[in-house]
Image (cartoon, rainbow, N blue to C red):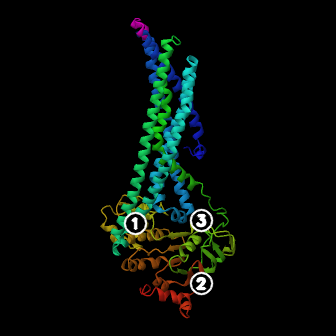
Amino acid sequence: MIDRRLFKIPGIMPRIVLIAFLTLIQAVMIVIQARALAIAVVQLWRLKPLTTIVTPTLVFAVSFLARHLLTVAQNRTFYPFVEKTSGKMRERLMTKLFRLGPSLVEKTGTGNMVTMALEGIDKVQTYLMLIVIKIMDMGITPWVILFYIALMQWKEAVFLLLIYPVIILFMIILGLAAKSKADRQYAGYQRLSNNFVDTLRGLGTLKQLGLSKRYANNVYSVSEDYRKETMATLRIAMTSTFALDFFTTLSVAVVAVFLGFDLLAGKIMLLPALTILTLAPDYFLPVRNFANDYHATLNGKNALKAVLDVLETPETKQRKALKQLVWHADSVVKFDDVSFTYEDVKTPTLTHVSFAIHGFQKVGIIGASGSGKSTLINLLGGFLTPDETGHISLNGQQLPHLSQEVWQRNSLYIPQSPYLFHATLRENVSFYQPNADEAAVKAACDKAGLTDWIAELPQGLATMIGEGSRGVSGGQAQRIALARAFLDDSRKILLFDEPTAHLDIETEAALKQDMLPLMADRLVFFATHRLHWINQMDYVLVMDHGQLVEQGTPAELASHDGPYTRLRAEMGGLHALN
């Protein structure tokens, strides 16, 4: 139920000790409350004057108030820490995702990552708030009550001690069943998130291909699976709650029967018997409260595990091996026999890739789907670490990988679907240059071809876009990514991973006119399967099944019958644009 990594969260242990101390005081208040109430009732039963119950009534009122004020104190003490911790966890998660790059997002799914960073952290906050307080309550309060009962009547204490693990065992059995269902529910939730986000991103293309209804049915099917998993989890939750309430109520009734027999036999006085009977429900209350919140925290536990797994994902080492870099006409990046293998597969995705690129060249990376283009772009961006075989060098300096801070500060990555933050258009454009002034942002937008569109927006650059805000087409999203690049002209290395793959031909043709000026005086790696881009490239890398099968200038490759010419023949018509 508890991920042990929870106790490694910075600053949580002092709070746990404080919660435990407050819970101990609260347990004492419960005992005092029950004792005072029993004294008052016994005095009334014996027809004593009302003045005799004033003191125990006041004690009861004070202890009752203190008990609940301590609950408020626990929440008020712990909530600011939990809120601050969850906020820092979200920041650390976003920073980690930025450092790990798109390879992790591709592996786990964009929808999953977005859900984890937004709703997942909220679930973690709920989980932390509930689980620590409930565990402390369940671990302290029953034993204080049991100790006090044992001082008065050992037989009832033994019964309560024996029945408690039986109830816990029963709860564990149902809890494991609920956990299994909750795990499947959370997996379904992740699958639904990925499916929905992917479908939403490709909606324009799906409409053009006439496949939107088919994918709408697919989203419906996935959501129905998630609904069924949720209902199955709720059924177990309600069953376990009913069973636990039944057994705890039955246990209190058994204690009452034992006390009744002892009263009739004269083995116990009324005051201790009534005190025990009053304390019995409070003895079981912590475990009942825990069980009621258990199902509410399962998704939080799964979310915490997912977040911590990402945060603990090993980062690339030796990120500062390259001390400085100013890319100029004489700079060289060289791959020598470089291979790469993903963790979950045995066969290398890239094998024995070798090339050397000089200065401000525009390098096209072409090949069929699955040929390794995106993997090569991710290696060039430093988002993946190559196998130990082979070498990478920059300006003659051998490096273990390109995940160098200096290299990445000089690089700009534009994927198929640039991510738009839930922020204003101005803030999205100035992502790499948050301190850029209004004039610079407008100039970048103008170069990216966004001026006419911005003029149509009621709030112009102040318009909110991204999740839950104004919709943005695929072409507009790519132009926003281009505006980011135009705004930060210090980055001389551009990495394009099929940026026009999801666009129609007309949109791509219009976008191409704005992209070409961006490539001037920069080193450009442009992965694409649309061969018309090759006309603008200075050098071409031809990929096939993870191997670099041919390289050279477009004219050199077209002068003989090789993989390049065969690829052009297979993709006839796609290179018709100028």
Indicate the amino acid at tag 2. Val
Q: Position of residue 439 (x, y in %)?
A: 41, 66
Q: Secondary structure at mark 3?
A: loop
Going from N to C along the chain, the mark reached first, 2 or 1, is: 1
In the picture, measured across the screen, residue 89 lies left or right of residue 575, that is right
- Report the front residue among 400 and 247: 247
Q: Position of residue 473 (x, y in %)?
A: 37, 69
Indicate the amino acid at tag 3. Asp
The stretch in magenta equals 45-53
Marks 2 and 1, Cα distance to the nearest angstrom? 34 Å
Q: Contact (CB < 8 A) between labels 2 and 3?
A: no
Marks 2 and 3, Cα distance to the nearest angstrom? 25 Å
In front: mark 2 or mark 3? 3
| Location of the C terminus (image quadrant) | bottom left
Q: Is residue 559 above or below residue 121?
A: below
Marks 1 and 3, Cα distance to the nearest angstrom? 26 Å
Indicate the amino acid at tag 1. Thr
- Is 128 within the magenta? no
Instruction: Indicate which disc residue 199 carries.
Output: 1
| Mark 1 burial class by Cα count in 10 Å: few <14, some 14-19, many 20+ | some
Q: Position of residue 13 (x, y in %)?
A: 60, 39
Q: Secondary structure at mark 2?
A: strand
Q: Which residue is mark 3?
A: 344
In the picture, measured across the screen, residue 399 lies left or right of residue 213, that is right
Instruction: Indicate which disc residue 549 carries.
Output: 2
